[in-house]
């Protein structure tokens, strides 16, 4: 019985597959509605890629643990770098969660995968 319990505790849930191109939209009180295109490359639980918006293209880094995703990228805001952190839950082709824009604020986030990486 104890060995079965120990085995159950060591079962690791594989990370969700998040590789691909995503359309991400989030809302904050200070910025209003924001939309970006995101390409995520995945190597096990490590994520890399880039975010594209009207200001340019920005490198992203992140992790995936089971269905929990965290992605971070930095954009220029009034001449200074501002870190944007996206945290959410992956459900198939969708991510729901929260985007935090530096110390400016945070808001709800929704993303949908528009294509998978080849």
Image (cartoon, rainbow, N blue to C red):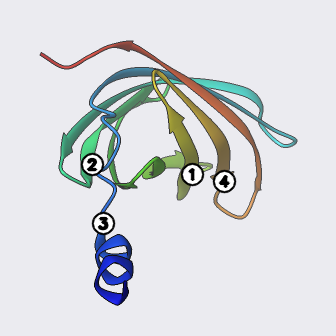
Q: Is residue 42 above or below residue 72?
A: above
Contact (Cβ within 8 Å) of mark 2 with mark 4: no
- Residue 108 seen anywhere in this rendered image of the structure: yes
Q: Mark 2 vs mark 4: which is more N-terminal?
A: 2
Please rate how many residues cluster around mark 1, counting C-alpha atoms within 10 Å: few if below 14, some from 14 to 19, many from 20: many
| Res 47 label | 2
What distance separates the C-alpha of mark 2 from that of mark 4? 18 Å
What distance separates the C-alpha of mark 3 from that of mark 4? 32 Å
Please indicate whether residue 89 sits to the left or right of residue 48 in the image.
right
Question: Which residue does the numbered mark 3 point to in the structure image?
Answer: 11
SS for tag 1?
Answer: strand
| Res 87 label | 1
SS for tag 4?
Answer: strand
What distance separates the C-alpha of mark 3 from that of mark 1? 24 Å
What distance separates the C-alpha of mark 3 from that of mark 2? 22 Å
Q: Position of residue 26 (x, y in %)?
A: 69, 32
Q: Which residue is drawn at 72% across and 64% down?
A: 103
- Residue 54 seen anywhere in this rendered image of the structure: no
Which quadrant holds residue 52? top left
Front position among marks 1 and 4:
1
Q: Mark 3 vs mark 2: which is more N-terminal?
A: 3
Question: Which residue does the numbered mark 4 point to in the structure image?
Answer: 100
Q: Is residue 67 above or below residue 56?
A: below
Which quadrant holds residue 4? bottom left
Q: Quadrant of the N terminus?
A: bottom left
| Res 111 label | none
Q: Which residue lies furthest to the front in this view?
A: 1
Q: Mark 2 vs mark 1: which is more N-terminal?
A: 2
Q: Residue furthest top?
A: 114
Contact (Cβ within 8 Å) of mark 2 with mark 1: no
Q: Which residue is drawn at 30% across and 66% down?
A: 11
Q: Mark 1 vs mark 4: which is more N-terminal?
A: 1
């Amino acid at each position: 019985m104890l060995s079965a319990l120990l085995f159950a505790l060591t079962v690791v849930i594989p990370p969700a597959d998040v590789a691909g191109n995503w359309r991400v939209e989030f809302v904050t009180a200070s910025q209003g509605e924001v939309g970006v295109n995101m390409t995520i490359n995945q190597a096990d639980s490590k994520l890399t890629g880039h975010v594209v918006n009207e200001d340019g293209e920005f490198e992203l880094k992140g992790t995936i643990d089971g269905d929990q995703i965290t992605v971070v990228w930095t954009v220029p805001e009034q001449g200074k770098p501002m870190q944007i952190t996206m945290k959410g839950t992956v459900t198939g082709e969708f991510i729901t969660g929260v985007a935090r824009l530096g110390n400016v604020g945070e808001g709800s986030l929704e993303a949908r995968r528009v294509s998978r990486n080849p």
